[in-house]
Image (tube, rainbow, N blue to C red):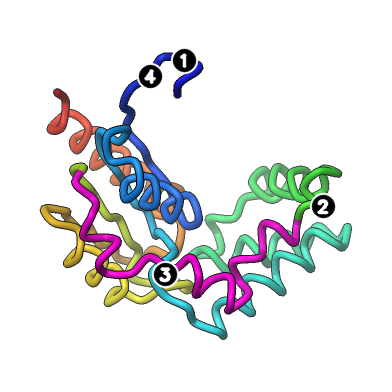
Amino acid sequence: MDAQSIKRAHFIGESLGGWIAAWLGIHHPQRVHTLQLVAAGGTKAHPDVMRKIKESTRNAVQTDDIDLTRKRLQLLMYDVKNVSDELVEVRHRIYHQPDFVDNIDHLLCLQEMPVRQRNILQPEDLAKITAPTLIVWGRNNPFGDVPEAAAMQSHIRGSSLELFDACGHWPQHEQPDRYNELSLAFLAANRK
């Protein structure tokens, strides 16, 4: 942002990206115009979910079997029909880039309990977010239940929560028309 002379920006983060966007809103509020936290991680530590993420990701990255990539993506979706061949091929290519493979432990470190606990976003952290915030969550999110999203919303003053029915961990992919309309309306309402 500094290199481009951008003082403030709108941030949209999904999953780990939502965790990072929230962290930015907590620690650098002057840089954040708005936040959209889409199935954001970072507020809970569920050992079974963490194990599933770690194992499925590592298997897909360390094995050239494209079906493991497909299975990893199917974990995210309410309806596995949303996992197209094109999506699998693109993700498979990403998973097998040398730098991605070499750095998989860095990506998965937040699935280790001591590291996750050290970085978890506490209610008092979320209360520091001052930017207008939209939280989007799938009611069938396999990595976090609706109460997790509701708690996040209750701690971020003035935030709103939109729940998508028949939706897993990727609302922007599973219901793009609804998500895009919601996102654009949120941005338009928070233009300054």
- Residue 121, located in which quarter of the rendered image? bottom left
Above or below, 171 relative to 24: below
Residue name at image x 81 percent, y 43 percent: 99
Residue name at image x 35 percent, y 64 percent: 138
The CA distance from mark 4 to mark 3 is 34 Å
- Labels 2, 1: front one: 1
Residue 64 in picture, x, y percent from top left: 88, 57
| Residue, disc 4 | 6
- Residue 167, located in which quarter of the rendered image? bottom left
User: Where are the magenta residues, as a range?
Assistant: 104-130
CB within 8 Å, label 3 to label 1: no
| Residue, disc 2 | 101
| Residue, disc 1 | 4
Residue name at image x 18 percent, y 35 percent: 185
Say what secondary structure mark 2 lies in: helix
The CA distance from mark 2 to mark 4 is 32 Å
Outermost residue toward the bottom? 48
Residue name at image x 36 percent, y 76 percent: 145
- Labels 2, 4: front one: 4
- Labels 3, 2: front one: 2
Task: Please indicate whether residue 33 sits to the left or right of residue 24 in the image.
Answer: left
Say what secondary structure mark 4 lies in: loop
The numbered mark, 3 or 1, whose residue comes first in the sequence reads 1
| Residue, disc 3 | 141
Q: Is residue 109 magenta?
A: yes
The CA distance from mark 3 to mark 2 is 27 Å
- Labels 4, 3: front one: 4
Residue 5 in picture, x, y percent from top left: 41, 14
The front one of 134 and 1 is 1
The numbered mark, 2 or 1, whose residue comes first in the sequence reads 1
The amino acid marked with disc number 2 is Val
